[in-house]
Image: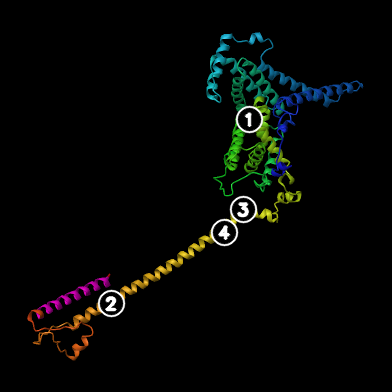
């Protein structure tokens, strides 16, 4: 119960396996079966249905009445389909006697040795080997099968899927002497060679409703755009941008799936997306993610990406992918989780997101909830508050800077005025000194007696320092020289002041 409260999404690992108990991964698209059990189940159901139709036709004809023309037409049409299927099987199986189609042992051993040295994913060298003489029979069978499938592209898509899987089985028997791992690698190259050519004929086939289901699923995911990571119990960073989103590589990988043609390449995109989801969850929680967290993260990535033609791509992998890639291994596990994620999105309701059904329906209609808990946890509102606080802080800093600039400007103006007043005072004093002059009088007086001044000189006494003249001739001459030095200094100050005023 505690685990159920912590997470809104929980899937038991036993639900991933085939419900027949074979040990392989099941899939919701196969009603819980693996691809092998599902194919056997559908074939047995098809045989039973044909047997019942034959019995119904026999009981109708036993009444003595002629069969209806429509029944004859349907019977002829079914026989024609069976004949076309047998023709296709004959093309890539060869004639019934196997001895005539057997290759020399030396050629077959050389071919097996060459294919055994192939590296995983080395499709270019595989094509080179396919042009070698020892691969002529394999190349002929592939070419004949491609031409027949292109000529019979109007067959139902499920019938084409059966023919492709029968071809895979017949080619796998050709490499039965190799190890299981090496056979799987060669079959991946065969699948890429065949399905790259058949993609335009079988993908989103007219006989299926894949296109309509793609539109329905795309609208469903678009309508669920209001789902937040917190509702899915996915931990995301508090402050993140579009470039720092840890789930961005996973979103890119799942979108790239539509650009691939081979089922194995599409499955590789699914594996890459799932691995990036695990890495993102581990980087956020600083510990390895478990299966429940991974499924929640994968659902969030699908909702965020809204991949194009998701249903058609998944059905393409199911119908034409190699069985061992989906029934087991890392790719099969990731694809099963993707199928569960899509099934969860299609059946998503309020309780799965810890919401009431009324709240869920309001969200689906585009109405905003008035719950205070939702408002406080809203990421958009949190960002708005942070932006408003930052703007207020910037505005306060701008006002403080403006006041500082004004104070500095006032201090600068006061300093300029003070300097200008000092310069004016010095210039005025220099002019007065030049106008009145300073004259030294030599009067025979007693040493250390003050010189008597006139009334006008008495007024100047307040501006200039007192001058005492001594009887000594040497002292008088020295005083005259000092006066000349003072006059020269005042002229220099006047010239400097004039230059400063000009500047």
Distance in Å between CA atoms under marks 2 and 4: 54 Å
Horizontally, residue 139 falls left or right of residue 77, namely: left
Q: Which residue is mark 1?
A: 331
- CB within 8 Å, label 1 to label 3: no
Q: Which residue is mark 3?
A: 380
Quarter placement of the C terminus = bottom left
Q: Secondary structure at mark 3?
A: helix
Residue 424 image label? 2
How far across and how far down the image is residue 157, in percent? 70, 28
Quarter placement of the N terminus = top right
Distance in Å between CA atoms under marks 3 and 2: 66 Å
How far across and how far down the image is residue 3, in percent? 71, 41
Q: From which residue to which does the magenta span run?
A: 476-502
Query: Which callout, 4 or 1, points at the residue further toward the start of the chain?
Result: 1
Query: Which callout, 1 or 3, points at the residue further toward the start of the chain?
Result: 1
Q: Secondary structure at mark 1?
A: helix
Q: Is residue 124 magenta?
A: no
Query: Which callout, 3 or 2, points at the residue further toward the start of the chain?
Result: 3
Q: Which residue is mark 4?
A: 388
Q: Say which quarter of the image contains residue 159.
A: top right
> Is 369 located above or below residue 153 in the figure?
below
Q: Say which quarter of the image contains residue 439.
A: bottom left
């Amino acid at each position: 119960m505690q685990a159920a409260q912590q997470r809104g999404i929980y899937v038991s690992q036993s639900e991933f396996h085939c419900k027949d108990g074979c040990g392989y991964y099941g899939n919701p698209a196969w009603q819980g079966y693996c691809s092998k059990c599902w194919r056997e189940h559908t074939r047995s159901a098809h045989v039973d249905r044909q047997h019942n139709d034959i019995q119904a036709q026999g009981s109708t004809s036993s009444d003595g009445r002629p069969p209806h023309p429509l029944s004859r037409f349907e019977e002829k049409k079914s026989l024609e389909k069976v004949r076309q299927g047998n023709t296709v099987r004959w093309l890539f199986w060869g004639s019934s006697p196997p001895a005539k189609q057997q290759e020399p042992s030396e050629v077959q051993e050389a071919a097996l040795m060459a294919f055994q040295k192939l590296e995983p994913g080395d499709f270019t060298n595989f094509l080179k080997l396919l042009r070698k003489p020892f691969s002529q029979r394999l190349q002929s069978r592939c070419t004949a099968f491609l031409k027949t499938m292109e000529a019979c592209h109007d067959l139902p898509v499920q019938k084409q899927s059966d023919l492709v899987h029968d071809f895979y089985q017949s080619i796998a028997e050709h490499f039965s002497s190799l190890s299981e791992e090496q056979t799987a690698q060669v079959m991946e190259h065969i699948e890429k060679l065949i399905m790259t050519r058949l993609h335009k004929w079988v993908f989103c086939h007219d006989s299926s409703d894949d296109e309509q289901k793609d539109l329905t699923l795309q609208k469903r995911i678009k309508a669920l755009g209001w789902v937040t990571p917190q509702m899915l119990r996915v931990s995301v960073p508090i402050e993140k941008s579009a470039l720092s989103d840890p789930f961005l590589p996973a979103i890119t990988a799942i979108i790239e799936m539509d650009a691939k043609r081979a089922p194995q390449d599409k499955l590789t995109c699914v594996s890459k997306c799932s691995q990036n989801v695990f890495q993102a969850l581990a980087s956020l929680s600083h510990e390895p993610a478990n299966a429940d967290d991974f499924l929640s993260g994968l659902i969030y990535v699908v909702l965020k990406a809204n991949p194009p033609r998701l249903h058609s791509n998944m059905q393409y992998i199911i119908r034409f992918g190699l069985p061992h890639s989906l029934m087991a291994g890392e790719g099969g596990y990731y694809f099963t989780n993707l199928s569960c994620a899509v099934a969860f999105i299609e059946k998503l309701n309020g309780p799965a997101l810890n919401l009431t059904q009324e709240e869920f329906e309001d969200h689906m209609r585009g109405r905003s909830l008035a719950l205070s808990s939702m408002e406080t946890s809203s990421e958009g509102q949190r960002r708005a508050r942070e932006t408003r606080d930052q703007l207020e802080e910037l505005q306060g800093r701008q006002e403080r800077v403006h006041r500082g600039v004004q104070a500095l400007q006032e201090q600068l103006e006061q300093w300029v005025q003070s300097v200008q007043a000092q310069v004016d005072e010095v210039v005025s004093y220099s002019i007065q000194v030049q106008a009145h002059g300073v004259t030294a009088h030599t009067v025979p007086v007693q040493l250390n007696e003050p010189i008597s001044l006139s009334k006008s000189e008495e007024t100047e006494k307040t501006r200039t320092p007192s001058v005492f003249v001594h009887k000594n001739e040497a002292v008088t001459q020295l005083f005259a020289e000092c006066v000349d030095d003072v006059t020269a200094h005042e002229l220099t100050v006047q010239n400097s002041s004039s230059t400063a005023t000009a500047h």
